[in-house]
Image (spheres, rainbow, N blue to C red):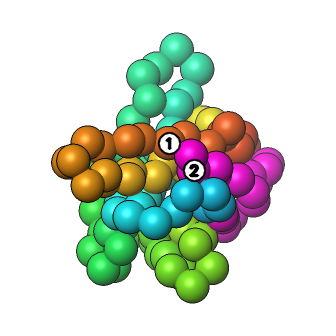
Amino acid sequence: QVRLAESGGGLVQAGGSLRLSCAASGSIFSINAMGWYRQAPGKPRELVATITSGGTTNYADSVKGRFTCSRDNAKNTVYLQMNSLKPEDTAVYYCRADKLLSDATLNIYWGQGTQVTVSS
């Protein structure tokens, strides 16, 4: 079992910055990709950014150039630096970890979510 603990959400004015953190604990061996997803009220959950154990990142078009996803493997922690925030970035942000088992089964784990609110 993998446990994910997010922190760093809050209220910020448009144009401001926030940094989210997600610490993984438990059975973290073979965690491959980690990342961030978000869900705004009335909308489906969407990908924000992902990062592999090797550091390869992938971003949603809506956040490219504004958000940076990074990972500290020694601390089993993934970060999301969010700059130039916009009101449309308001959502609950969820951390996700993908664990590939020896039989090729992929287990997906989610954090509890952290609220990010951007005021105009």
Closer mark to the observer between disc 1 and disc 2: 2
Which residue in the protein does label 1 denote?
109
Magenta part of the chain: 1-23
- Direction front: furthest residue: 103
**Left or right: 96 in relation to 91:** left
Q: Amino acid at mark 2?
A: Val
- Asked where in the image residue 87 lies, by quadrant, the reply is top right
Q: Give the mark nearer the N terminus: 1 vs 2.
A: 2
Residue 12, magenta (yes or no): yes
State the predominant SS element of the stretch in magenta.
Answer: strand
Name the one closer to the observer, 21 or 89. 21
Relative placement, left or right, of 4 versus 30 is right
| For residue 80, side relative to residue 55 (left or right) | right
Give neighbour class at mark 2: few <14, some 14-19, many 20+ (Cα, 10 Å): some
Which residue occupies 58% across, 72% down?
A: 76
Q: Residue at x 30, y 43 (%)?
A: 106
Q: Are marks 1 and 2 in contact (CB under 8 Å)?
A: yes
Instruction: State the residue lying farthest toward the left.
Output: 104
Relative image position of residue 40 (x, y in whole percent): 55, 28
Foreground pick, 21 / 115: 21
Residue ID at (26%, 42%): 105
Q: Which residue is mark 2?
A: 2
Circle 2: element type: strand
Dot 1, how many residues are within 10 Å of its Cα: few (below 14), some (14-19), or many (20+)? some
User: Residue sitting at 66 percent across and 40 percent down?
Assistant: 113
Q: Is residue 84 visible?
A: no
The single residue placed furthest to the right in the displayed view is 11
Q: Amino acid at mark 1?
A: Tyr
Whether residue 32 appears in this view of the structure is: yes
